[in-house]
């Protein structure tokens, strides 16, 4: 797991990459807060229904998608390995 989080061999991220990561976490974070408030209100009034279960399941999937999207951005956009592979494929297609 520590190798997964070792970013020392990556170049420093650009402003657009930082913005993409911010967007990746900001909107799901806001949605998580809203769903949490909704669920707390519904549980407090004993009105937690099937629609709330569906919203909760969708929120869990959104959290999982956020994590996967973060690692995809990290390894496919920021990673120098990706750009090395892309330059190899471009030079092979040019010749």
Image (tube, rainbow, N blue to C red):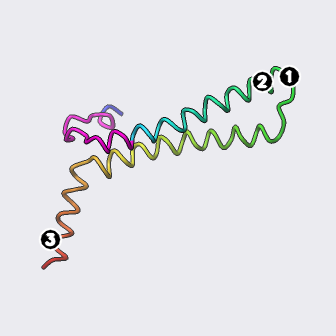
Q: Measuring from the top left, give residue 49's x and y in whole percent.
A: 84, 36
Quarter location, residue 91: bottom left
> Residue drawn 81% across and 20% down?
44
Q: Is-magenta flag for residue 12? A: yes
Q: Earlier in the sequence, mark 1 or mark 3?
A: 1
Apparent side of residue 20 relative to residue 31 in the rendered image (left or right): left
Quarter location, residue 8: top left
Residue 95 or residue 26, whichever sits in front: 26
Residues packed near mark 1 inside 10 Å, few (<14), some (14 to 19) or many (20 plus): few
As drawn, the label of residue 41 is 2
Q: In the structure shown, which secondary structural element does the residue marked by tag 3 occupy? A: helix
Q: Measuring from the top left, give residue 81's x and y in whole percent.
A: 22, 52
Residues packed near mark 3 inside 10 Å, few (<14), some (14 to 19) or many (20 plus): few
How far is the residue under mark 2 from the one under mark 1? 6 Å
Magenta stretch? 3-20
Q: Measuring from the top left, give residue 67's x and y in whole percent.
A: 47, 40
Q: Which residue is mark 1?
A: 45
* Quarter of the figure that contains the N terminus: top left
* Quarter of the figure that contains the C terminus: bottom left
Apparent side of residue 93 relative to residue 75 in the rendered image (left or right): left
Q: Residue furthest top?
A: 44
Apparent side of residue 9 relative to residue 69 in the rendered image (left or right): left
As drawn, the label of residue 91 is 3
Tag in front: 2 or 3 = 2
């Amino acid at each position: 797991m520590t190798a997964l989080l070792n970013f020392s061999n990556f170049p420093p991220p650009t402003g657009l990459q930082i913005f993409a990561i911010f967007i990746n976490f900001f909107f799901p974070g806001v949605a998580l807060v809203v769903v949490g408030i909704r669920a707390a209100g519904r549980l407090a009034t004993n009105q937690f229904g099937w629609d709330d279960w569906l919203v909760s399941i969708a929120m869990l999937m959104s959290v999982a998608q956020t994590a996967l999207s973060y690692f995809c951005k990290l390894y496919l956009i920021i990673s120098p390995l990706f750009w090395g592979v892309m330059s190899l494929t471009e030079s092979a297609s040019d010749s």
